[in-house]
Image (cartoon, helix red, strand yellow):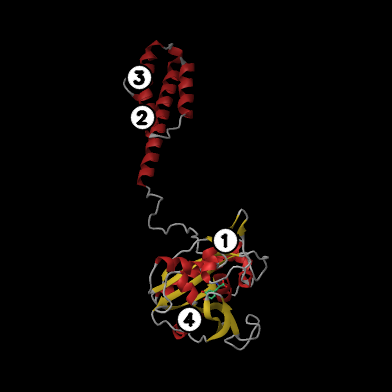
Amino acid sequence: MIEKLKDFIDEVQQFTADTKEKAEELRLKFLSRKGILNEIFAEFKNVAPTEKREYGQRINALKQLVEKKINEAQEKFEEQASKPNDLDITLPGPNYSLGSHHPITNVLNEIIEIFSRLGFTVAEGQEIEDDYHNFTALNFAPEHPARDMQDTFFIETNPDILLRTHTSGGQVRVMEKQKPPIRVLVPGRVFRNEAVSARSHCIFHQVEGLYVDKNVSFADLKQTLMYFAKEFYGEKTEIRLRPSYFPFTEPSAEMDVSCSICGGKGCGICKNTGWLEVLGCGMVHPNVLRNCGIDPEVYSGFAFGMGIERTAMLRYGVTDIRMFFENDMKFLSRFKL
Ligand code: DAH
């Protein structure tokens, strides 16, 4: 008998009521009407008189122990219920590091935004182009040495298909579909079979501009580019147009802007000339208009094209064009807006 009581005491001592259900189970098992304690009390009369005293003491100890365990558990549950919730929903959330646009995207978006104020919309050309749209329609005669100005990646099995060497083919695709007035930008990736170095890459981006309407003149071209230069490079910027040659424009020019780094005084970036070459431009050649079904006797137009990497290098002071293609997080995170 006494041994049995000792076992019950051990059992209760090891018991931990970590849930309300467990505490209730303990109560039912020992303290309820049909519980163990009542059973033990009923046995009391059968206990030998010499053991009655110890038996009685142990019953009391067991009862107190059970009550203590249940009280402790109840106190614990009440305390937990009255504690304020640890979750403070007014605290600011964790700071997730957001990604950012690539510097090339930033510069391109800025260029598009400036020209959109002048009514230019955006069209897409295609990266895999045919010889006709990349060269022939743009007045590059077959075997014309100007084709060598741009080292081309041809598709080996079909020399008529190539990776576009400039976005100018986009002009042709727009004029084939649309009648003047046309004011459009064609941004995109271009490819040239050139050795990769700090100054040039075999993949880069350009944005092409085209304006075709009645009575479009070189003065319109100059004014449009001056507006762009001042908006993009700063109010004090001056421009300079130097005669140049492109098969698809006549006359053709290259535009320089006064160096935004030294203000035109001369520095390392502008190689002490005070000027930076930023784009090619000109009046759309009558042959190009004709190739696209636009009558050059009625309409005239201007076009321009600029490299985005070069523009971004000048804007951000980047000296190695390869950085734009390396996906170096340290480099890219500098351009978070
Ligand atoms: N396509 C020329 C190039 O890649 C850039 C260019 C020059 C575009 C003159 C034009 C232009 O539209 O009128 O070097």
What amino acid is at disc 1? Leu
CB under 8 Å between discs 2 and 3: no
Q: For marks 4 and 3, give the one nearer the viewer.
A: 4
Q: For marks 3 and 1, give the one nearer the viewer.
A: 1
Q: For marks 2 and 1, give the one nearer the viewer.
A: 1
Q: Which residue is mark 3?
A: 38
Location of residue 214 in the rendering, given as x and y in whole percent from the top left corner: 38, 80
Q: Please tell me whether mark 4 sits on a helix, a strand or a loop.
A: helix
Location of residue 336 in the rendering, given as x and y in whole percent from the top left corner: 51, 67
Q: Which residue is mark 2?
A: 24
Q: CA distance from mark 2 to mark 3?
A: 17 Å
Q: Nearer the viewer, residue 165 or 43?
A: 165
What amino acid is at disc 4? Leu
**Which numbered circle lies on residue 225?**
4
Mark 2 nearby-residue class (10 Å; few <14, some 14–19, many ≥20):
some
Q: Which residue is mark 1?
A: 163
